[in-house]
Image: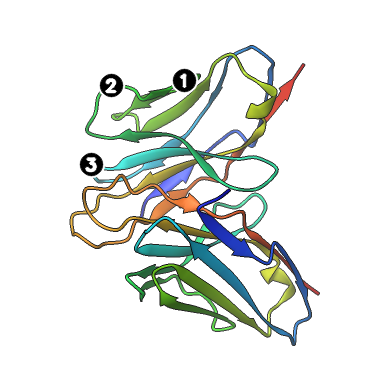
Amino acid sequence: ETGVTQTPRHLVMGMTNKKSLKCEQHLGHNAMYWYKQSAKKPLELMFVYNFKEQTENNSVPSRFSPECPNSSHLFLHLHTLQPEDSALYLCASSPAGAGHTGELFFGEGSRLTVL
Amino acid sequence: AQTVTQSQPEMSVQEAETVTLSCTYDTSESDYYLFWYKQPPSRQMILVIRQEAYKQQNATENRFSVNFQKAAKSFSLKISDSQLGDAAMYFCAYRRPVYNTGTASKLTFGTGTRLQVTL
């Protein structure tokens, strides 16, 4: 059983669809993250939320819209995606602040295919 | 900006043998954390080992150990007595220092090394 749960595990969508990815963490962490994982590329940090506030947006296109209603839940809303957006999207959480080692705890990922 | 380089896209090791995965990084900071993560085919990334830059002693976790060379900015992972379950993608990651309470942790990852374990 994982402390970070992502749904759905697999998603296929057309370029005009609207869908959402969901992430839930049961670890009592205050920070949550979205990463994009593409083959042969480093993990790309997309968004960071700290105590429900977005603290990082790494120049992510507006067709990706994050939402963090509380410290335990994180969503990634998808709209008008492109085929190059096909990837594994990883959610992670961590404690926040100095004094922590800063390791991230990951979910199993959502495999997104855009047709 | 910090960068993490893993120069070995793929490695192979025989069961029960030892393998070393390489990682170098670039930073101007003197205090930071380094991590090795494992991503098996089931996809969940799990932490293998961490190293605090201010500690001279190399971290060890059972069959996993690191060779941390701060001056050379090198952080290699050694897996001893390799097992079939060690087959996975391995990612090296860097975390810059965090001085403020409540600050989120940003990790920079390398491109990964795919480890195959053969009988």
Q: Residue at x 67, y 30 (%)?
A: B87
Asked if residue A2 is positioned above or below residue A78 in the image, the reply reads above
Q: Residue most toward the right?
A: A115
Badge 2: chain ID: B
| Badges 2 and 1, same chain | yes
Q: Give SS at disc 1.
A: loop
Q: Residue at x 36, y 26 (%)?
A: B68
Location of residue A62 with respect to A106 vertically, above or below: below
Give the label, 1 or 3, closer to the camera. 1
Q: Which residue is mark 2?
A: B57
Looking at the picture, which amino acid does disc 1 mark? Asn
Q: Amino acid at mark 3?
A: Asp
> Residue A104: x and y, percent?
43, 51
Residue type of the residue flagged with mark 2? Gln
Q: CA distance from mark 2 to mark 3?
A: 15 Å
Separation of residues labelled 1 and 3 (CA atoms):
25 Å
Q: Is residue A11 above or below residue B41?
A: below
As drawn, the label of residue B31 is 3
Write the residue at 51% across / 45% down.
Answer: B110
Q: Earlier in the sequence, mark 1 or mark 3?
A: 3
* Residue placed most toward the observer, B43 or B108: B43
Answer whether labels 2 and 1 touch (C-beta < 8 Å). Answer: no
Q: Which mark is residue B62?
A: 1
